[in-house]
């Protein structure tokens, strides 16, 4: 039975532990686990069905039970620092998905909370005492059915104009293990293909297609119904508390992105501006 998933950690569990060309290791930050899978060869990429690169899975308790998310944010920022090339000066944050469909609203919700700074000129930065503020642009291109334009085309057009050093693309994912629903953040440096988890794959966003490194950040918000019962129906299942869970996930990811992109600005200042 083919049960869809975007999580490399789930795909890797189907492969032999000693699979050549795949490196794995884990790290614990209190109640948060960071599991890293590095695919280093073309053969391993073919066997696993994912591009070569680094995939980090951050796992944590159920978000509706979490009151203090600081450990998750710490682990997410640490992972971003590990996986993203150093020395970048400008960034474009992209929120993929449909804001009107809650399980697919993660990307747009994150974009609403990421600090956009590209429009702030140098004089205003000096006046505000924020000379070290990095240039960040934010877009949520919506979905083809609403705009008539592929998200890929909007993003590449924006990128060609802005010329960011990196792109951070945030999207909702699909998983096959109910224990991972809204309890996992996957971050990879291999780009992203929107809609692939629900059999609606669009054009891929990656360094080859866009020309700059694309970092994919996602949270599984839906699960293939075949994980629970054998059915020929094309159905996905989502938790009944999905509105709360997606909102919390968006808060964690947006705060992590802000802290990562502006490491020289005090945390209190960043959070007061968003």
Image: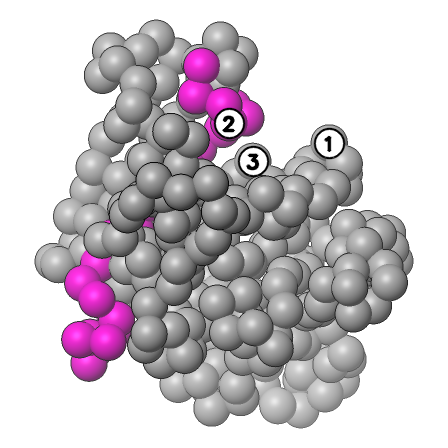
Mark 3 highlights which residue? 190
Within the magenta stretch, is there residue 69? yes
Q: Quadrant of residue 14?
A: top left
x 62%, y 90%: residue: 128
Closest to the observer, 76 or 87: 76
Disc 2 vs disc 1: which is toward the camera?
2
Residue 119 visible within the image: yes
> Quarter holding the N terminus?
top left
Q: Is residue 21 part of the magenta span, yes or no?
A: no
Residue 45 appears left or right of 10? right
Q: Quadrant of residue 255?
A: bottom left
Please tell me which of labels 2 and 1 falls first in the chain: 2
User: Which residues are the magenta region?
Assistant: 47-71
Give residue 76's mark: none
Q: Is residue 111 visible?
A: no
Colour option used? one colour
Pointer 1: what residue? Answer: 208
Where residue 161 appears, as percent x and y from the top left, is: 88, 58
Whole-Å distance between the Cαs marked 3 and 2? 9 Å
Name the residue beneath numbered marker 2.
50
Please rate how many residues cluster around mark 2, counting C-alpha atoms within 10 Å: few if below 14, some from 14 to 19, many from 20: some
Q: Position of residue 168 (x, y in %)?
A: 59, 55
* Label 3 crowd bin: few (<14), some (14–19), many (20+), radius 10 Å: many
Q: Is residue 92 above or below residue 36?
A: below
Q: Nearer the viewer, mark 3 or mark 2?
A: 2
Q: Give left or right: position of 122 versus 25.
A: right
Q: Are marks 3 and 2 in contact (CB under 8 Å)?
A: yes
């Amino acid at each position: 039975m083919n049960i869809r998933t975007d999580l490399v950690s789930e795909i890797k569990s189907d492969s032999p532990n000693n699979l050549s060309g795949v490196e794995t290791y884990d790290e614990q930050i209190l109640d948060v686990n960071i599991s890293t899978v590095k695919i280093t060869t073309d053969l391993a990429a073919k066997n696993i069905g994912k591009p070569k690169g680094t995939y980090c899975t951050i796992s944590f308790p159920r978000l509706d039970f979490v009151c203090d998310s600081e450990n998750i944010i710490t682990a997410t920022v640490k992972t971003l620092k590990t996986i993203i090339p150093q020395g970048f000066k400008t960034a474009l944050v992209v929120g993929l998905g449909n804001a009107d469909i809650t399980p697919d609203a993660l990307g747009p919700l994150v974009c609403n909370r990421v600090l956009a700074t590209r429009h702030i000129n140098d004089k205003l930065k000096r006046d505000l005492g924020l000379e070290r503020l990095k240039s960040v642009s934010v877009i949520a291109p919506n979905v083809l059915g609403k705009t008539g334009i592929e998200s890929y085309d909007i993003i590449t057009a924006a990128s060609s104009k802005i010329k960011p050093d990196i792109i951070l693309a945030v999207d909702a994912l699909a998983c096959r293990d109910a224990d991972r629903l809204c309890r996992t953040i996957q971050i990879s440096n291999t780009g992203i293909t929107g809609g692939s988890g629900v059999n609606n794959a669009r054009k891929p966003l990656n360094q080859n297609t866009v020309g700059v490194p694309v970092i994919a950040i996602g949270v599984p918000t839906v699960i293939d119904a075949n994980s629970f019962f054998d059915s020929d129906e094309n159905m996905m299942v989502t938790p009944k508390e999905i509105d709360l869970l997606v909102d919390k996930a968006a808060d964690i990811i947006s705060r992590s992105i802000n802290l990562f992109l502006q490491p020289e600005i005090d945390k209190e200042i960043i959070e007061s501006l968003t």
